[in-house]
Image (spheres, rainbow, N blue to C red):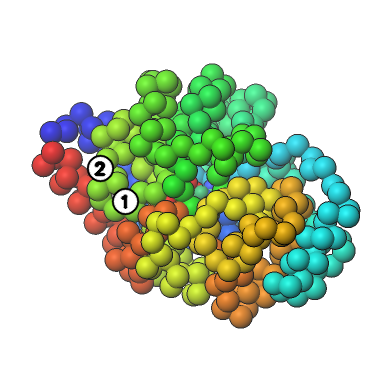
Amino acid sequence: MSQPTSARALQFAQGLGLRVPLLMAPMAGASPVALAAAVVQGGGMAGYGALLHGPAAIADWVRGFRALAGADAALQINLWVPDPQPVRDAAHEARVRAFLSGHGPEVAAEAGDALPPDFDAQMEAVIEVRPRAFSSIMGLPSPTWVQGLRQAGIAWWAVVTTLAEARAAAAAGADAIVAQGAEAGGHRGAFDAARARDESIGLLALLPQVVDAVAPVPVIATGGIADARGIAAALTLGASAVQLGTAYLHCAEAGIAPAWQSALVDNPPEATRLTRAFSGRWGRSLATGYVHAAAAPGAPEPAPYPVQRGLTAAMRKAAEAAGDVQHLQAWAGQSAALAAPWAGQSAATKTNAAWVAALALLQAG
Ligand SMILES: Cc1cc2nc3c(=O)[nH]c(=O)nc-3n(C[C@H](O)[C@H](O)[C@H](O)COP(=O)(O)O)c2cc1C
């Protein structure tokens, strides 16, 4: 079978100018130009997590990407919709700083003041460079920005983690919905940070219900998909395309810390954890020594996002320099080890091969 399944996916891919319906997940801090260009070479779509980049860095990244992949190469740029201002508690932050100083360098008193770049300025930069798609996570952009994207001819995709979020995104006019299952590596995209852990839904339950709820809006599946079986399954469940994150972190072009990359190879699905310990927002990481220690009885609750991100910056930087995976911010999805055969391989080869194998499964079905 499933002619309708592969036809739906190929039609969606064609609309984006892709040969294959596979997308590189946008990954803040792990979306190098070389990886994005390799995915395009393999027939898929590049992803760029621009959260930590200001307008000049966004323009630079896109210039570098287009120099390598071609001026018209298909690209998704992603930004985080800002959370409400965090409530600060100086006494509690001092306890977190003392705890972190036991896991890395001394944490400066002002470390928690660090802020991500201004969202509106980032949005202006995105509209200026005109990617094929812009994706939002952690909430919905304002109607003014949705209109701005539309006027610029940029498709707006909304990452969702629940049915209610999917319905809200469709009602707000999203051109596609990215259904993020709880298996996903990196931050969970819950609109309300406080609900991100309790409302963790596996992709097998989330995806078909989102597909039904938002039809005819196309749905992109992401979270725990790391081989041809997962791709074929997600398309069978109604997805129009599949987005891979952790799988690409194995590739030669990923450029992540070697200690993180090698730890992904044989990491079983039970050895990841949802944690707030790196940024203050729930995300899925390798179950490292620091992640366990931060969840142990007596450890101080992490500060809210983005305060915790600032507080952990020194530890993360020192761990990266030392190649210490136990204190690195080592995001990983539950299917990390499934993509072990991708280790050291080019994302160009793997993207194309994964689609050929998935198509064979769909046609054999
Ligand atoms: C290192 C890393 C960074 C990520 N950063 C972002 C981000 O900035 N924005 C976003 O929408 N999703 C981000 N994600 C989530 C991915 O877009 C995607 O949902 C996830 O990787 C899919 O699950 P998988 O890793 O199991 O393939 C990140 C994931 C990883 C692994």
48 relative to 271, above or below: above
Q: Residue at x 88, y 55 (%)?
A: 91
Q: Relative to 235, is 304 on the left or the right?
A: right
In terms of depth relative to the viewer, which is nearer, 217 or 286?
Answer: 286
State the image coordinates of residue 130 (x, y, percent, origin top left): 55, 41
Which residue lies under the disc numbered 1? Answer: 43
Q: Relative to 11, is 101 on the left or the right?
A: right
> Amino acid type of disc 1?
Gly
State the image coordinates of residue 95 (x, y, percent, origin top left): 82, 60
Mark 2 surroundings within 10 Å by alpha-carbon count, few (fewer than 14), some (14 through 19), many (20 or more) = many
Q: Residue at x 46, y 48 (%)?
A: 184
266 relative to 83, above or below: below
> Depth-wise, is mark 1 or mark 2 nearer the camera?
2
Quadrant of the rendering where the N terminus is positioned:
top left
Q: Relative to 198, is 229 on the left or the right?
A: left
Give the Cα separation between the discs numbered 1 and 2: 17 Å
Which residue lies under the disc numbered 2? Answer: 232
Asked if residue 31 shows in the view, the reply is no
Asked if residue 263 shows in the view, the reply is yes
Q: Residue at x 72, y 53 (%)?
A: 302
Outermost bottom residue: 322
Q: Residue at x 29, y 46 (%)?
A: 230
State the image coordinates of residue 310 (x, y, percent, origin top left): 75, 59
Q: Secondary structure at mark 2?
A: helix
